[in-house]
Image (tube, rainbow, N blue to C red):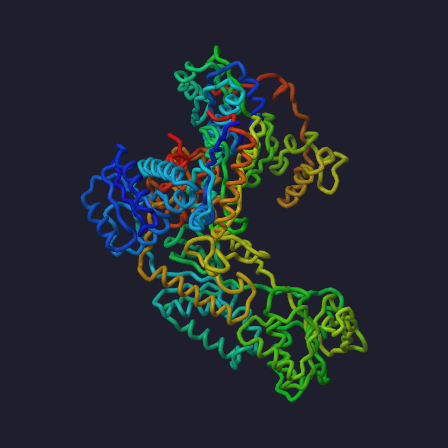
């Protein structure tokens, strides 16, 4: 799921400086699960903003709303009546939610309240780790289910670099070497022969993000 | 400066703070004015938003009375409360409010004197700090 | 406008009449008040029956008792034979004696404070809703995991009480670690014979279903409705439906195997027990020679456990009396905190057993095929000297480290109970609730909680019997719904609450319409997966309520609105 972290409130206060009535919009999906933008966080942030502005003598009115998600047109449009009443929107959904609102409300400033960090897994409660970088062409079958794009600092596709040492990465000393993990896992599955298959270099400029904005179109689903 | 009685919201858990408050009364110890007592079954019930809302809606300080670590009858309520307090502290620091306005105090049912002492000390501290500039 | 009735309790004059009058005047002017009655001692049975009669008239949304601490009234309400004709959760107490009158210096301030407390309490009780009681049928079926001395004793006692017991043992035979014992330290019985009798009672009891070579594979459900999946010797799986579970899986021992500890003359306690049980006398022979000097080396491991101390003194006495050996016991501390141990220790010293107290660990070396033990005795008269003592021993008996069994960790995961000190299963409260786990309906007893001597295990077995029979005797478990409840529509299934609930009362389940939970296997259509708090297992602490990132959980008897009212806020 998308994992995000709240922006420091002093940064958010800078964005909101010119405005006196805003809507603080959370999201009931990914950011709720990682405790960055659910209804609880909306309440907390709203209270903090009000007190901060009260302190400097420039009161702010904060309306609070937490739709189930912010990334569908219907959810965005549901908020239209409320958005008409405010000068700006602070969205603590992920970057997708912010931009969905932007597309549907072109005349209102929409600000992000979280930093969308990565697609990640829950390791244990309160600890999340990056697992996927949405490269668009998943090679997990060949690597025993361990992603070399997100977990290898150099995004190598055919084995470790010379810096892999005692299972750890030379770029980030605390991180496990992804290729060590891949090797160990393929060995446990008796699939080491898969490492002998050469994975060709990713065509970043053609099939991935460096080729520009990506779009998925399902003609069979279109209404 | 005219006398200002800082408003303190004291969250008291049923297994520590609340009986300590009763004991303080039985011992006829004297409490500063303007202390609101909120009774909860466990400090774990205290949501972070209550700490902030207390300040937002007029309190100058918040005290959470919880059991000593490893003494929570519900095993981890007081530890969760500590975590929520540190969240509130981080926010207070960033918005320019003194983080001393929210504090946790660990005690037991027999700590009537400590209960009153902590509230008196807080009241004195808040008098020096002045009223909460964030209250609406 | 809610209609609130007021009872002012002067607590036999603790609240002076003048103060009480001013309070009355204030209260009677408030719009929500239906009536305001004064009592001198509300907690008395006469006053309570008067209250009952007044409540029967009905038409009230809540009651506020203005008096002393809520604890006073809560205990007297509990003692009532007939409950008051108003739901107990519609009562609130304005504690103006302990927390206003007695805490304020001037009466003026006390009155102000009392008025604030009263108005806040009235507002809080206006948000209250009646909370119903529910009951859960409890069938007299219990699962006991572990066929050692504790498990066997509990099975026996519960069977006597008419409860049906499934006794599940992972090994091939019953008895556990107690089989290593030959004699008890405090009773003149032979352990083997005593155990065999107990085991045959268990085997022949129709109330006890004995399942050996069987293990627990999965546990679902909560108090009264546990579904325990077990796997037998032929790999078949069965599901047992039980009301309560007892974990009595015992402990394991680990022997030190480095260096000199591998020597054949360095033995552990069970080996000495075996030797003593097999030898008839008059002397102890080993490897063709008579054993004359035995040294016990205690507190190298298990420093805070007294089991080794007890066994050492017990064996030492047998060695000195029956086999004319000389015994030396080296320890950091002589642990005699067990029934009869002080007398036994004195007897041992009288019979000539030597005790040496050390601080530095003694050194062992091999000298002419025997073991030489060098120790600095700290019980010297001149404290600054530590007399070095050398003991040339035929045997050195050392402790094995007591550790949790290898399955304990996975058992704690299966049962969803906590692990405590050193990885043993944890009790809820070591002083008051020693045999309860953190989960309602699951009990922990015996050495799986902490390595202990047989007498202690028998006491814990009786404690569990008492707890379980008390729980199951009425055939139902009655509880009120003053617990947490999840709104499945808001639940994001983030798993925060199941992880954080200290009592493992929350699981993620399937829901159908709105708040209707669908029992699995009924074929009804499920629309949601969401968290569900089991109301019979919930302790009402509110931790999940505060942690939920979607604010989907409500604590029925202490909602946000009631807390804000207590804080003096209008929300």
Q: Is residue B109 visible?
A: yes
Q: Nearest the camera: B8 or A8?
A: B8
Residue C391 percent location from the top left of the image: 76, 77
Residue B69 drawn above or below residue C29: below
Q: Nearest the camera: A184 or C414?
A: C414
Residue C463 percent location from the top left of the image: 44, 65
Task: Give the quarter of the image for residue C153.
Answer: bottom left
| Residue found 50% across the figure and 79% down from its top | C193
Q: Residue furthest top?
A: A107
Q: Residue furthest left?
A: C57
Left or right of C184: which side holds C109?
Answer: left
Task: Give the quarter of the image for residue A153.
Answer: top right
Residue A131 percent location from the top left of the image: 60, 33
Q: Nearest the camera: B35 or A97?
A: B35
Left or right of C537: which side holds C386?
Answer: right
Residue C250 percent location from the top left of the image: 53, 64
Name the quadrant of the N terminus of chain C: top left
Left or right of A199: which side holds C491?
Answer: left
Q: Residue furthest right?
A: C368
Q: Is residue C485 visible?
A: no
Q: Residue furthest bottom?
A: C282
| Residue found 34% across the figure and 38% down from its top | C118
Residue C418 drawn above or below residue C168: above
Tally of numbered tags: 0
Name the quadrant of the C terminus of chain C: top left
């Amino acid at each position: 799921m998308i994992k995000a972290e709240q922006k420091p409130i002093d940064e958010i206060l800078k964005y909101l400086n010119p405005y006196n009535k805003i809507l603080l919009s959370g999201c009931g999906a990914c950011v709720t699960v990682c405790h960055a933008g659910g209804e609880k966080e909306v309440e907390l942030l709203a209270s903090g903003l009000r007190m901060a502005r009260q302190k400097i003598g420039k009161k702010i009115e904060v309306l609070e709303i937490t739709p189930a998600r912010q990334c569908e047109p219907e959810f965005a449009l549901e908020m239209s009546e409320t958005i008409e009443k405010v000068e700006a929107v602070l969205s603590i959904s992920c970057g997708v939610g912010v931009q969905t609102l932007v597309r549907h409300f072109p005349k209102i400033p929409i600000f992000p309240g979280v930093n969308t960090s990565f697609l990640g897994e829950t390791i244990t409660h309160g600890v999340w780790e990056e697992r996927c970088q949405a490269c668009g062409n998943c090679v997990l079958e060949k690597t025993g289910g361990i992603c070399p794009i997100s977990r290898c600092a150099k995004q190598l596709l055919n084995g470790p670099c010379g810096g892999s040492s005692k299972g750890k990465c030379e770029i980030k000393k605390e991180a496990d070497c992804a290729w060590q993990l891949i090797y160990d896992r393929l060995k446990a599955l008796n699939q080491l022969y898969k490492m002998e298959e050469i994975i060709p270099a990713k065509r970043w400029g053609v099939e991935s993000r460096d080729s520009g904005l990506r779009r998925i179109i399902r003609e069979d689903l279109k209404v | 400066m005219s006398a200002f009685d800082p408003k303190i919201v004291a969250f008291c858990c049923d297994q520590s703070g609340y009986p300590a408050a009763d004991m303080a009364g039985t011992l006829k110890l004297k409490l500063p004015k303007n202390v609101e007592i909120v009774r909860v079954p466990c400090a774990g019930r205290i949501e972070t938003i209550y700490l902030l809302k207390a300040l937002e809606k007029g309190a100058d300080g918040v005290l959470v009375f919880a059991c000593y670590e490893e003494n929570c009858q519900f095993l981890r309520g007081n530890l969760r409360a500590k975590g929520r307090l540190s969240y509130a502290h981080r926010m207070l620091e960033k918005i320019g409010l003194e983080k001393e306005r929210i504090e946790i105090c660990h005690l037991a049912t027999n700590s009537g004197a400590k209960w009153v002492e902590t509230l008196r000390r807080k009241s004195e501290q808040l008098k020096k700090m002045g009223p909460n500039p964030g209250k609406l | 406008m809610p209609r609130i009735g007021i009872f002012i309790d002067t607590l036999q004059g603790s609240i002076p009449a003048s103060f009480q009058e001013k309070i009355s005047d204030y209260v009677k002017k408030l719009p929500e008040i239906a009536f305001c009655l004064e009592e001198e001692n509300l907690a008395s049975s006469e006053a309570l029956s008067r209250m009952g009669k007044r409540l029967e008239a009905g038409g009230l949304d809540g009651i506020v008792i203005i008096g002393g601490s809520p604890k006073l009234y809560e205990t007297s309400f509990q003692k009532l034979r007939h409950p008051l004709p108003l739901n107990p959760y519609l009562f609130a107490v304005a504690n103006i004696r302990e927390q206003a009158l007695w805490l304020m210096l001037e009466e003026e301030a006390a009155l102000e404070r009392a008025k604030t407390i009263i108005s806040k309490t009235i507002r809080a009780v206006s948000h209250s809703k009646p909370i119903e009681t529910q009951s859960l049928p409890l069938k007299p079926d219990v699962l006991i995991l572990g066929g050692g001395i504790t498990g066997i004793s509990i099975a026996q006692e519960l069977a006597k009480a008419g409860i049906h017991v499934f006794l599940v043992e992972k090994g091939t035979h019953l008895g556990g670690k107690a089989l290593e014992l030959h004699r008890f330290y405090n009773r003149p019985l032979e352990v083997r014979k005593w155990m065999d009798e107990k085991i045959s009672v268990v085997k022949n009891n129709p109330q006890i279903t004995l399942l050996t070579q069987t293990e627990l594979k999965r546990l679902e459900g909560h108090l009264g409705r546990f579904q325990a999946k077990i796997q037998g010797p032929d790999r078949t799986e069965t599901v047992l439906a039980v009301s309560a579970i007892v974990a009595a899986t015992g402990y394991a021992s680990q022997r030190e195997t480095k260096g000199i500890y591998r020597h054949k003359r360095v033995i552990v306690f069970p080996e000495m027990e075996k030797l003593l049980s097999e030898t008839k006398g008059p002397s102890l022979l080993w490897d063709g020679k008579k054993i004359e000097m035995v040294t016990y080396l205690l507190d190298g491991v298990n420093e805070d456990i007294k089991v080794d101390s007890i066994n050492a003194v017990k064996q030492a006495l047998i060695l000195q009396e029956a086999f004319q050996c000389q015994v030396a016991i080296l320890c950091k501390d002589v642990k005699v905190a067990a029934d009869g141990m002080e007398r036994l220790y004195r007897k041992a010293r009288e019979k000539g057993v030597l005790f040496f107290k050390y601080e530095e660990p003694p050194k062992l070396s091999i000298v002419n095929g025997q073991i030489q033990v060098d120790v600095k005795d700290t019980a010297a008269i001149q404290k600054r000297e530590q007399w070095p003592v050398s003991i040339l021993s035929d045997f050195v008996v050392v402790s094995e480290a007591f550790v949790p069994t290898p399955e304990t960790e996975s058992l704690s995961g299966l049962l969803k109970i906590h692990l405590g000190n050193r990885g043993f299963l944890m009790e809820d409260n070591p002083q008051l609730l020693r045999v309860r786990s953190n989960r309602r309906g699951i009990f922990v007893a015996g050495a799986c909680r902490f390595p202990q001597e047989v007498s202690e295990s028998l006491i814990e077995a009786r404690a569990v019997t008492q707890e379980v029979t008390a729980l199951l005797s009425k055939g139902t478990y009655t509880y009120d719904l003053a617990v947490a409840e999840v709104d499945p529509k808001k639940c994001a299934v983030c798993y925060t609450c199941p992880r954080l609930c200290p009592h493992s009362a929350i699981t993620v389940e399937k829901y159908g319409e709105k708040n209707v939970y669908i029992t699995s296997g009924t074929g009804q259509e499920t629309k949601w997966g969401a968290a569900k708090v089991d109301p019979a297992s919930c302790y009402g602490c509110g931790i999940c309520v505060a942690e939920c990132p979607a604010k989907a959980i409500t604590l029925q008897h202490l909602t946000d609105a009631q807390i804000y009212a207590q804080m003096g806020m209008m929300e």
